[in-house]
């Protein structure tokens, strides 16, 4: 049993869990373009996922998709193929006589090899490694089954080189977005856990109530929490088996060893880290994990200072989903905070220090959003500017125009995400958050209606404004309210069928003013309504998911309105349309 990596097995991975839908769509478009524009029947873009390569975009027939969809190929196989390949520039060609004999990790076309010297053999492989800026292999573009039946000529190779560069950029963007989303998810889980833990008088007794946040944040199937020295159990429904005191002692010794090295311990049903465990102990613990019905476990030591005060064990049933570095580091951070909370509950003198750490953790998400967004903004501006210059070049080929247009659209979408992230960070920072002042609503209403008028006319929608005559007093600021109303009207216009109507209505209710946006759209399910104003949440409705979006618009709108002392509510039924109500305070005379 090596400490380097778990052994490899033919497995399947749900590619829908990889990155976000927009990134997967971009990669699928590139794969389709490679096949259609260069003359191949099969094009596959894969990403490195732990010690495996997983197919994330597949262009090919039903047999190709059935074979390759979700396939996990060991990275050892990939490196072995690249080692014997011929160097064709960015691409590496593996002729059939050097191909690996293992057919479990590839699709082989059912064709007879031609008699010409350059005929394509079913075991031939044409691969383009995709690297990050540090030269680390992050994915692969694989091409197969040329329509001509022959190996690509210099012209085709030139086109393939350009598509490989495009695939590399798109893959790195997708990986970056996935890493950012994961860090935000882990940060939110950590914040929720620590907030709850330090608010309880008896932390050990309350740890079980942290289960939902931990399970969701770390995509685990179950967990158990124990604290020392009293071994208080917070398993909260973990399947019970007969665990001997010897096993408990082994887990505790492992936790203390992990805490001393500031690391977590990972076990799968057939792999362990031999730098932490001897084989006999590992076999015992692996058997316990398997008897519980799981395939892998991550043991996270809980402690503070020099003391290990307990452990957290997260379980997964799918060994194909590895515990990522961010998850390992994030879990260790959470365990540190839990350890502080445990010690604080035993020693009230440390309470002030824990409160200070909680405040620091509370601002982590805002700092992360602001830092990442600022770091991305300038490079995106440079990319957009150069793309505009390239696009203005006369006599561009059709292929180049296609590539420039695709990159421009991707840059615009990414820039929109960055701007939304910056706005979200500013709204969550008390020092930069806008507060409401007395104003007249009418300019913001008119500007918002004007911003969606073109889209409404294109869809033959009727835009209606129902508001009292004269000034419309409210508390807020014009720019922020215009953004909120434009977002709500934009969504209403986007999801209302052609020929429908969208209404913007203003009503005064005692000390509040209600701004209602009503549409005749697809509606929102009760389940989706519960998470509608959460960052990065996209509807589970396939019709809504088909429309582009970042999942940040409603979250930003909700924070803007709450900054004015107001709130946003939603009423909706599937197929019946939706009504969003913005309630704002009315300034006192």
Image: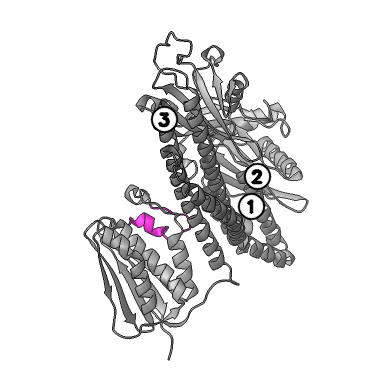
Residue at point 46%, 37% (across, down): 15
Closer mark to the observer between disc 1 and disc 3: 3
Per the image, the residue denoted by label 1 is: 334
In the picture, which quadrant includes the N terminus? top right
Q: Which residue is drawn at 59% across and 60% down?
A: 370
Neighbours of disc 2 within 10 Å: few (<14), some (14-19), many (20+) = many
For the residues bearing labels 1 and 3, Cβ distance under 8 angstroms: no
In the image, which residues are magenta?
524-539
**Residue linked to disc 2:** 300
The residue labelled by disc 3 is 35
x, y percentage for residue 39?
A: 40, 27
Q: Which residue lies furthest to the bottom in this view?
A: 589
Q: Which residue is drawn at 43% across and 73% down?
A: 481
> Taking 62 as reference, is 572 above or below it?
below
Residue 68: image location, x then y, percent: 44, 27
Quadrant in which the C terminus appears: bottom left
Q: Name which residue lies at 45% across and 36% down.
A: 14
Circles 2 and 1: CB atoms closer than 8 Å: yes
Vertical side of 427 occupied by 203: above or below = above
Sequence-wise first label, 2 or 3: 3
Left/right placement of residue 530 relative to residue 103 reads left
Whole-percent x, y for residue 117 in the image: 48, 10
């Amino acid at each position: 049993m090596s400490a380097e990596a778990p052994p490899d097995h033919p497995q399947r991975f749900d590619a829908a869990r990889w990155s976000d839908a927009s990134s997967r769509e971009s990669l699928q478009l590139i794969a389709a373009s490679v096949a259609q524009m260069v003359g191949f029947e099969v094009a596959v873009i894969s990403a490195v996922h732990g010690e495996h390569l997983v197919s994330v975009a597949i262009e090919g027939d039903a047999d190709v998709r059935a074979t390759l969809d979700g396939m996990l190929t060991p990275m050892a196989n990939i490196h072995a193929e690249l080692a014997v390949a011929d160097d064709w520039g960015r691409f590496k060609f593996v002729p059939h006589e050097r191909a690996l004999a293992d057919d479990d990790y590839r699709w082989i076309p059912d064709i007879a090899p031609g008699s010409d010297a350059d005929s394509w053999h079913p075991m031939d492989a044409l691969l383009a490694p995709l690297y990050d800026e540090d030269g680390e292999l992050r994915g692969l573009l694989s091409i197969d089954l040329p329509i001509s039946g022959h190996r690509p000529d210099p012209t085709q190779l030139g086109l393939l080189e350009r598509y490989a560069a495009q695939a590399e950029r798109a893959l790195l963007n997708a990986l970056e977005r996935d890493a950012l989303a994961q860090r935000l998810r882990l940060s939110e889980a950590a914040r929720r856990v620590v907030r709850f833990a330090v608010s309880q008088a008896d932390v050990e007794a309350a740890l079980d109530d942290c289960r939902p946040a931990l399970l969701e944040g770390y995509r685990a199937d179950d967990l158990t929490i124990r604290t020392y020295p009293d071994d208080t159990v917070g398993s909260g429904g973990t399947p019970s088996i007969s665990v001997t005191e010897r096993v408990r002692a082994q887990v505790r010794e492992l936790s203390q060893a992990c805490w001393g090295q500031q690391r977590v311990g990972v076990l799968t049903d057939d792999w362990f880290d031999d730098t932490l465990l001897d084989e006999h102990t590992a076999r015992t613990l692996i058997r316990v994990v398997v008897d519980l019905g799981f395939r892998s476990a991550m043991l996270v030591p809980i402690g503070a200072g020099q003391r290990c005060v307990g452990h957290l064990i997260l379980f997964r049933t799918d060994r194909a989903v590895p515990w990522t570095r961010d998850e390992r580091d994030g879990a260790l951070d959470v365990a540190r905070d839990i350890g502080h909370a445990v010690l604080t509950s035993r020693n009230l003198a440390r309470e002030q220090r824990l409160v200070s750490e909680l405040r620091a953790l509370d601002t982590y998400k805002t700092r992360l959003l602001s830092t990442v967004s600022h770091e991305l903004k300038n490079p995106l501006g440079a990319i957009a500017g150069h793309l505009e210059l390239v696009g203005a070049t006369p006599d561009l080929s059709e292929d180049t125009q296609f590539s420039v247009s695709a990159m421009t659209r991707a840059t615009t979408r990414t820039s929109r995400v960055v701007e939304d992230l910056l706005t979200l960070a500013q709204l969550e920072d008390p020092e930069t958050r806008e507060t409401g002042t007395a104003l007249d609503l009418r300019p913001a209403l008119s500007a918002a209606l004007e911003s969606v008028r073109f889209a409404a006319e294109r869809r033959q929608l009727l835009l209606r404004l129902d508001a009292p005559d004269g000034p419309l007093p409210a508390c807020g600021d014009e720019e922020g309210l215009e953004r909120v109303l434009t977002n709500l009207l934009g969504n209403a216009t986007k999801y209302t069928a052609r020929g429908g109507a969208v209404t913007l209505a203003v009503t005064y209710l005692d000390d509040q003013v209600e701004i209602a946006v009503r549409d005749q759209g697809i509606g929102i399910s009760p389940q989706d309504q519960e998470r509608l104003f959460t960052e990065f949440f996209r509807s589970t409705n396939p019709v809504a998911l088909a429309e582009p979006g970042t999942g940040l618009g409603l979250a930003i709108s909700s924070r803007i309105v709450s900054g004015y002392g107001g709130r946003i509510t939603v009423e909706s039924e599937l197929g019946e349309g939706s009504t969003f109500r913005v309630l704002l305070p009315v300034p006192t005379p």
